[in-house]
Every structure is written in C-alpha cells, then in structure tokens.
Amino acid sequence: MIRIIIADDHSIVREGLKQIIADTPDMIIADEAENGHELISKIETGKYNVAVVDISMPDSHILDLLKHIRQIQPRLPVLILSMHPEDQYGVRVMKAGAAGYLTKESAPTDLITALRTVSAGKKYISATLAEKLIFALNNHNSKAPHETLSDREFQVFCMLAESKPAKEIAAELYLSEKTISTYRSRILSKMQLKNNSELIHYAVKNGLANA
C-alpha cells in the first residue's frame, strides 16, 4: 500500500486529490496538511511513501520546503503539483530534490502514474521537461535571465513578482530588510531590469507569476 500525504492550502484541491486516489486500491491518503509547517511536523512523526506538495504554499517557499524535507526524511519522494508551466519551474524544483513535477492541468491518470513512479524510487517528468533538464545541464551559457539566479535570489524574485514589500519578504525568509534590498539589487542587475515594474512584467510574461 502506497501511503500518501498531501499538502495544499486549498481544501477543494485536497478533496479532489482524495477522490482520485480513493479509486486506486493500492493507494491511500494517510494524512493531509494545509501549509508547510504542518507538513513538516507530520513528516517528522508519520510514515509515508510519497508526499504530494503544492508548489505555492502560503508559509513556505517550495525550495526551502524541499530542503527541509530532505533533511528530515531524505528518502521520502516529493511530487510537486503546480499551476505553473513545467518549463518555468520544473527544472529548478527537480534540481532542488523533487522526485516529480506535475501541472494541475494533468489528467487524473497522470497523477496515478506519477505516484507509482516516484514511490518506486524513480523520477517522474514529462518528455518536454526531460529535454529542458538535459539542455539546462549541457548549456550553462544559454539560460533565460531568471535561470541565472541562485535559489535564494529566485525566492526573492518570486516574492517581488507578487508585489510583496521588502518587510514582508524579510519576515517570511527570516532575513533583514537590508539583505532583501541587496538581493533585489543583485536580481535586477543579473536580469538587466530597471525596477520592480519591469521585474513583474517579466514574471507575468514568462509564466512565473499571475497577471
């Protein structure tokens, strides 16, 4: 039996996942969480074969969450569910330790296939994402501007793209406002952008943020 914990801040999404998996005899939703802190707490004490995690948790950036999960349960496969195109987020989360990446537009059969694949210790990615990963590994000089950012810079970039103020970003990442300001300047410089407005426009245009 494949024991699954699902983490999503929307109850309707969690209920939908439970309905899909309920029809699969060798799988069971063993637990659920509505935020990153709850997920970590349950992973520390529970026994699961797969964690299905929404890419946009309200209290935790996915890259930090993946790092924390690897520290406490290094063998637990994490399948990322995302509303973002896989070519924009997929490569980064797979490099950060995710076992699979699935968009929320995928068919229910794709979810079941992904769960079976990652629970068996394999990676689940689409053919398109596989090509993107290979390209990213072999072409270090042909990256899109946002792909040149470090993981921490990318976190700050995503939060700036959501129009979050520096004070809020600093609180969420447990950093000082001065440090966030430094990251912002570095991000704008690396991406050759002039201000936050251009950053937001870039993020929306490239499917990294909602309009």
Image (cartoon, rainbow, N blue to C red):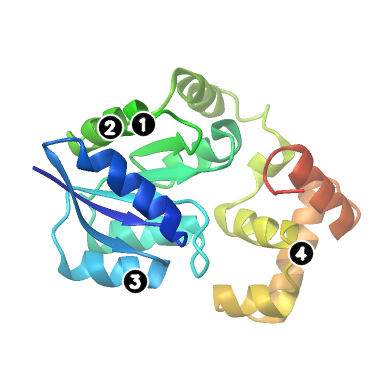
Residue 120 location (% of width, % of height): 17, 33
Which structural element holds mark 2?
helix
- On screen, residue 162 versus residue 135, left or right, reads right
**Looking at the picture, does residue 135 appear above or below residue 29?**
above
Which structural element holds mark 4?
loop
> Which amino acid type corresponds to the residue marked 4 in the rendered image?
Ser
> Which amino acid type corresponds to the residue marked 1 in the rendered image?
Pro
CA distance for labels 4 and 2: 36 Å
The residue beneath circle 2 is: 112
**Looking at the picture, does residue 129 appear above or below residue 59?**
above
- On screen, residue 167 versus residue 100, left or right, reads right
Which structural element holds mark 3?
helix
Among the two numbered marks 2 and 3 on one chain, the one whose residue lies closer to the N terminus: 3
CA distance for labels 2 and 3: 24 Å
Among the two numbered marks 1 and 4 on one chain, the one whose residue lies closer to the N terminus: 1
Q: Badge 2: how crowded within 10 Å, few (<14), some, or many (20+)?
A: some
- What is the residue that sits farthest to the left in this orientation? 1
Residue 72 location (% of width, % of height): 24, 64
CA distance for labels 3 and 1: 26 Å
Is mark 4 in CB contact (under 8 Å) with mark 3? no
Image depth: mark 1 or mark 4 in front: 1
Among the two numbered marks 4 and 2 on one chain, the one whose residue lies closer to the N terminus: 2
Task: Please state which of residues 154 and 16 is positioned toward the viewer in this rendering.
Answer: 16
